[in-house]
Amino acid sequence: GAVVSQHPSWVICKSGTSVKIECRSLDFQATTMFWYRQFPKQSLMLMATSNEGSKATYEQGVEKDKFLINHASLTLSTLTVTSAHPEDSSFYICSARDSTGAYSYEQYFGPGTRLTVT
Amino acid sequence: AQSVAQPEDQVNVAEGNPLTVKCTYSVSGNPYLFWYVQYPNRGLQFLLKYITGDNLVKGSYGFEAEFNKSQTSFHLKKPSALVSDSALYFCAVSFSGGYQKVTFGTGTKLQVIP
């Protein structure tokens, strides 16, 4: 089955620093990847849609300059949290849509990255 | 606009008993419906989906869900609950022509009591 990986699985950083999270589709090509944020005991909130070779589409209320997304290849999207603050601490999950599969509506989710900003 | 409602924050069921986790949805167009399970500090695992065809959908780990168009529901069921089924369950919806964006419900915590 389709596998999506995320790296790192958890990260602790100091306030003011930047953190990069990678999302990779391991055995399929993904022209579209999605970045979600999940607060404790809450649902997933879509942050942005990442399209290979073009600018990401951000959801309303998400700061594009703070959450930089790059989708440089068909198997890799990155989310960089710039100048991180404690309120950015969260569980970040990516998903990828198999652009070549018969069921293009399916999304495959990564295991998530736990970010803690101190 | 599309939305998903999971009316129960938590469902408790005794091991061996049948379980139901409720989900209702609202979309414009034909719905694509999904159920995912999440264990603590883990990503989402796909359980099952309804796209078209039979209203009763069977998925992983013995789970099934029934699509009811008139009631706009997609309840998750299992005939006999296991303690290991205890987790957070999310219902999600997309729709034909809008598959780029999936909307998740707020999640239901399932607690299976030994």
Image: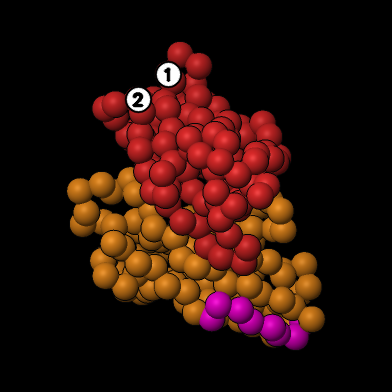
Taking the image as drawn, is residue A58 in sight? no
Rendered view: A92 above or below B21: below
Viewer-proximal residue, A94 or A78? A94
Q: Chain of mark 2?
A: B
Q: Residues within 10 Å of mark 2 (few under 14, many from 20)?
A: some
Residue A52 location, quadrant: bottom left
Q: Residues within 10 Å of mark 1 (few under 14, many from 20)?
A: few
Colour scheme of the picture: by chain
What number of labels is visible? 2
Provide the residue designation for mark 2: B55
Question: Helix, strand, or loop for circle 2?
Answer: loop
What percent of the width, then of the height, locates residue A1? 28, 62
Identified at 77% across, 67% down, the residue is: A87
Give the magenta part as a residue range.
A8-15
Viewer-proximal residue, A24 or A73? A24
Question: Helix, strand, or loop for circle 1?
Answer: loop
Taking the image as drawn, is residue A102 in sight? yes
Q: Is residue A5 rendered to the left or right of residue A68?
A: left
Amino acid type at circle 1 is Lys
Q: Colour of chain A?
A: orange
Dots 2 and 1: beta carbons under 8 Å? yes
Rendered view: B104 above or below A44: above
Which label was assigned to residue B69? Answer: 1
Viewer-proximal residue, A4 or A79? A4
Identified at 26% across, 56% down, the residue is: A99
Identified at 22% across, 54% down, the residue is: A101
Residue A10 location, quadrant: bottom right
What percent of the width, then of the height, locates residue A106? 34, 49
Residue A9 magenta-drawn? yes
Q: Colour of chain B?
A: red
Which mark is first along the chain, 1 or 2? Answer: 2
Amino acid type at circle 2 is Asn
